[in-house]
Image (tube, rainbow, N blue to C red):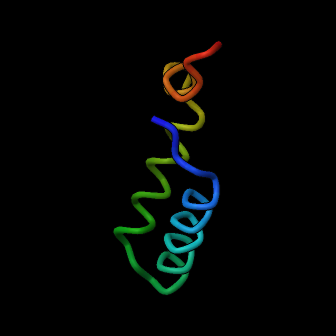
């Protein structure tokens, strides 16, 4: 799946703003995204060309 960077940035900025405002669901989503970005298998899934 190819998601435009602009959309990804908008979603992340929204989640960050919501988390700063105390939204615990946004905080949990950001935590999960952070965990995915640090795991080896997720890196390979996000970059299938490697």
As drawn, 13 above or below 6? below
Q: Nearer the viewer, residue 50 or 37?
A: 50
Please state the horizontal and vertical placement of residue 22, each as a whole percent of the image: 45, 83
Instruction: Locate the N terminus by quadrant.
Output: top left
As drawn, 27 above or below 1? below
Q: Nearer the viewer, residue 1 or 23?
A: 1
Instruction: Look at 49% across and 70% down and name the residue there.
Output: 15
Q: How many marks?
A: 0
Please state the horizontal and vertical placement of residue 47, each as a whole percent of the image: 59, 24
Q: Nearer the viewer, residue 31 or 7?
A: 7
Please state the horizontal and vertical placement of residue 50, each as a whole percent of the image: 65, 13
Quadrant assignment, res 26: bottom left
**Which residue sits furthest left?**
25
As drawn, 3 above or below 21? above
**Which residue sits furthest top?**
50
Instruction: Look at 52% across and 46% down and name the residue there.
Output: 3
**Which residue sits furthest bottom?**
21
Instruction: Look at 56% across and 64% down and name the residue there.
Output: 12
């Amino acid at each position: 799946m190819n998601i435009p960077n602009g959309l990804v940035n908008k979603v992340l900025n929204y989640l960050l703003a919501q988390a700063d405002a105390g939204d615990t669901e946004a905080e949990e989503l950001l935590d999960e995204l952070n965990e995915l970005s640090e795991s080896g298998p997720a890196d390979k899934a996000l970059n299938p060309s490697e």
